[in-house]
Image: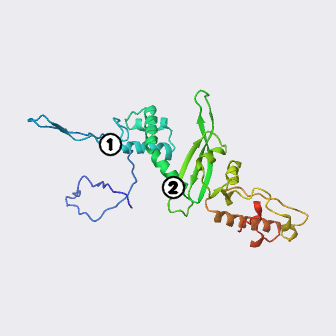
């Protein structure tokens, strides 16, 4: 309903009946179709007039407007489209080159890569400001994601990582800063966080352990726990499970952002397991995770 409408009318070629009488319009039928027009390119012609004084021979001309790439042809809108296509829509530059070619705009992928690099340089002050605001928070989230990286000369890719650091969902300033690294070594996290000390929400990856030794407080993500046996012997002695049949279950990580959903799913899952075994699993018998912290807590 929020989209603009382009009305196309269809009327009969003749409005006179075969008997000779004039036809009268008594209504209409309306059907709507959803249409799409690919991106339309246009050229901005910046005309800077020259003004001269015949008397003193003084020439006056408006200054050139600032651009992201000096003396380059792309506008800020085109550069934004390239960046969003590459980094948000994950379009490789060779695909973007083909998409632009279908609109009869020939831009080599090498040029698109140069534009992306120039924009990265111009955006680096913003990234540094975001990092400074991020490190002023007392609670942060951290995770690392593998990405394939093509090593020049090798002819194949190897696994690099994007380390992501973000504020919590309760922070009024939503920030996520990405740090590219060629490995998963923990020194990348230590180099990024520097002297920051606070509470870090992360998984049990060993690369974060050196941070905890210097004062950073570890907050385990409930979506990754428990990774060890979750049915303790005390549950068996309490009659929840048959004493002669000690059962061990593992919960598959679901990587959901809200830990509350995970706790509810864990509770329901164990109730289902109890029903299958003929046992009852009350709320107080939620299994114990690593470190003795109850999942219900």
Q: Specify whether 88 is left or right of 55.
A: right
Q: Specify whether 17 is left or right of 201.
A: left
**Residue 167 — which label?**
none
Residue depicted at 54% across the width and 50% down the height: 177
Q: How is the image coloured?
A: rainbow
Instruction: Give coordinates of residue 203: x percent, y percent.
Output: 68, 54
In space, the residues marked 1 and 2 are separated at their CA atoms by 28 Å
Residue depicted at 67% across the width and 56% down the height: 215
Residue 207 in view, yes or no: yes
Residue 49 in view, yes or no: no
Quarter of the picture containing the N terminus is bottom left
SS at circle 1: loop
Task: Identify residue for label 1.
Answer: 66
Residue in front for this viewpoint, 129 or 228 = 129
Q: Closer to the camera: disc 1 or disc 2?
A: 2
**Residue 133 — which label?**
2
Instruction: Give coordinates of residue 73: x percent, y percent.
Output: 34, 36
Q: Residues within 10 Å of mark 1 (few under 14, many from 20)?
A: few
Q: Specify whether 46 is left or right of 286.
A: left
Instruction: Looking at this view, name the residue that lies furthest to the right.
Output: 244
Decide: is 28 above or below 13.
below
Instruction: Give coordinates of residue 40: x percent, y percent.
Output: 35, 43
Quarter of the picture containing the C terminus is bottom right
Residue depicted at 76% across the width and 57% down the height: 250
Q: Residues within 10 Å of mark 2 (few under 14, many from 20)?
A: few
Dot placed on the residue nearer the N-terminal end, 1 or 2:
1
């Amino acid at each position: 309903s929020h989209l603009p409408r382009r009305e196309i009318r269809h009327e009969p070629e003749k409005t006179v009946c075969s008997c000779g009488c004039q036809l009268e319009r008594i209504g209409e039928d309306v059907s709507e179709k959803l249409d799409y027009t690919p991106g339309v390119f246009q050229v901005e012609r910046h005309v800077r007039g020259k003004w001269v004084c015949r008397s003193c021979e003084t020439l006056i001309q408006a200054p050139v407007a600032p651009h992201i790439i000096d003396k380059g042809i792309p506008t800020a809108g085109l550069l934004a489209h390239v960046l969003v296509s590459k980094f948000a829509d994950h379009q490789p530059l060779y695909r973007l080159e083909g998409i632009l070619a279908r609109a009869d705009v020939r831009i080599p992928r090498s040029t698109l890569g140069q534009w992306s690099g120039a924009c990265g340089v111009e955006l680096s002050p913003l990234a540094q400001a975001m990092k400074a605001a991020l490190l002023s928070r007392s609670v942060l989230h951290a995770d690392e994601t593998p990405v394939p990286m093509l090593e020049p000369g090798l002819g194949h890719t190897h696994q690099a990582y994007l380390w992501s650091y973000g504020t919590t969902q309760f922070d009024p300033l939503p920030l996520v800063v990405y740090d590219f690294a060629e490995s998963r070594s923990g020194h990348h996290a230590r180099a990024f966080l520097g002297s920051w000390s606070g509470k870090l929400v992360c998984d049990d990856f060993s690369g974060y352990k050196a941070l905890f030794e210097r004062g950073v407080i570890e907050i385990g993500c409930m979506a990754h726990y428990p990774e060890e046996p979750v049915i303790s012997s005390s549950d068996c002695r309490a009659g929840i499970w048959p004493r002669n049949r000690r059962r061990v279950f593992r919960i598959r990580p679901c990587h959901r952002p809200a830990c509350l959903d995970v706790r509810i799913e864990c509770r329901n899952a164990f109730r289902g397991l109890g029903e299958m075994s003929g046992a009852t699993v009350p709320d107080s018998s939620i299994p114990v995770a690593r470190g003795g912290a109850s999942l219900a807590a």
